[in-house]
Each structure stands twice: as structure tokens, then as C-alpha cells.
Amino acid sequence: MNAHVPEPKIVDAAALAQLFTQARTHNVFLDKPVSDDLLRQAVDLAKMGPTSANQSPMRILFLKSEAAKARLVPLMSEGNRAKTAAAPVVAIAAFDEKFYEHLPFLMPHVDAKSWFSGNEAFAKRSAFQNGALQVGYLIYALRAVGLDTGPMSGFENGKVDAEFFPEGNVKSNVVINIGYGDATKLFPRSPRFAFDQIAKFL
């Protein structure tokens, strides 16, 4: 007798709108503070997304003070400086290239550390790939707790790393402005590809 397989459930339309169809990238935010509790909730959601061997390489700095943001702003591309300075919170999402040091805790049932330790190129590539994957989880987690985001890749990675991650093994990936977006300042939504332009069935 076959075991009962439950019918898959899709989240409701309101949740889909908040996460995907109505959510937008914001450049201007309202003058409203963002609580540390919401940021903690978002990280606790994002960390649940899958990564290869549960390696969890993402590391995040949440810049909330004017002094902290002032260290970052000159390292952003010119077009990203003003909006970064004005954002209530700015996250530097990075990845730890020595994530494998934590695998005895994160994946205790197998010696996963040995897969990466001593194989620097493989470890770096895996850290970047899975760290980038976790950035996506973080953006949707922030949306899920009611926040808006403005992710950016326009900044000087090497200088950001030297300023914020001097230990050398953590590398910046994406900067995300966070807050409550000002919908009156949004541009019209840009086009998206049709399904057949990005996917196929084999």
C-alpha cells in the first residue's frame, strides 16, 4: 500500500505578492527606523535555506550608525553613494572562504571539512556560489518580515574587504540597503523574460 503523499500547497496570493510579484527594489526609503529584532528574524529565516554540505558561508555586517555607513559610502560606485548614505540600514553580505572550519559543527555526521581543507580553489568557488545563494535567501527573508531592499553590486570589493574584513578570509559579495521603501519614488517595473526565454523542458 502506497504511503499517503500530501498535496503540495502554494502560499497565498498576499504572501506571493509580498515576496515576488509586488515587491520592488527600492532606492529611496522612508525616515523610519528598522528594529534589530526584524533583522535578527530575517537572518534566522535566511539561514534555513539549503547550501551545499550545509556550509553556510554567508557573513553579514549590518551598518546602522552614521559613522559605520560613512566608512562604506566612499567605496560605493558614484551612483550608489547618496542612497547608501540615506538608507536606514546597510548590509554588507559576504562569504567566508574558510567556512569548512565550521563543518564539524554544521555537518557532524561526515568528515566534510576534508573535502575543502587543502583544496583552496574548490573552497573559494564553493564559498562564493553558496554565499551568493544565501544572499538571495536573505533578500526574500527581509521581504518576508516586512522590509524593503535595494541590493547592489556596484562597489570596490577589495577596498570594502580591507576596511570591514581585514582578517582576510571573509570577502564582500553584495551590499543591500534596507528599510521601508518610499513607493512614490519607484520607477516603473522593468521587463522580465517570458518562460520560454529562460527555461525549457527536456
Image (cartoon, rainbow, N blue to C red):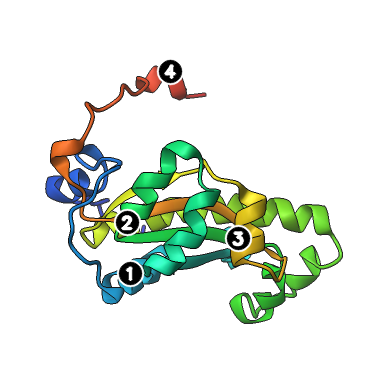
> Residue 95 — which label?
3
Give the Cα separation between the discs numbered 3 and 2: 19 Å
Identify the element where label 3 is drawn: strand
Label 4 Cα crowd, 10 Å radius (few <14 / some 14-19 / many 20+): few
Give the Cα separation between the discs numbered 1 and 3: 18 Å
94, 13: nearer the viewer: 94
Residue 107: horizontal and vertical position, in percent?
Answer: 62, 75
Q: Which badge, 2 or 4, comes first in the chain's sequence?
A: 2
Q: What residue type is labelled 3?
A: Phe
Nearest-to-viewer mark from 3 and 4: 3
Q: Name the residue under label 4.
A: 197
Q: Which amino acid does label 4 sit on?
A: Gln
Identify the element where label 4 is drawn: helix
Q: Which badge, 1 or 4, comes first in the chain's sequence?
A: 1
> Residue 66 — which label?
none
In the rendered view, does 169 fall on the left or right side of 70?
A: right
Q: Which badge, 1 or 2, comes first in the chain's sequence?
A: 1
181, 103: nearer the viewer: 181
Q: Mark 1 points at which residue?
A: 39
Label 3 Cα crowd, 10 Å radius (few <14 / some 14-19 / many 20+): many
Residue 147: horizontal and vertical position, in percent?
Answer: 24, 57
Nearest-to-viewer mark from 1 and 2: 2
Kindly check if marks 3 and 4 are in contact, taking CB atoms under 8 A apart as contact.
no
Task: Name which residue lies at 18% across and 43% down.
Answer: 17
Q: Mark 2 points at which residue?
A: 178
Residue 65 seen from this side: yes
Residue 2: horizontal and vertical position, in percent?
Answer: 36, 57
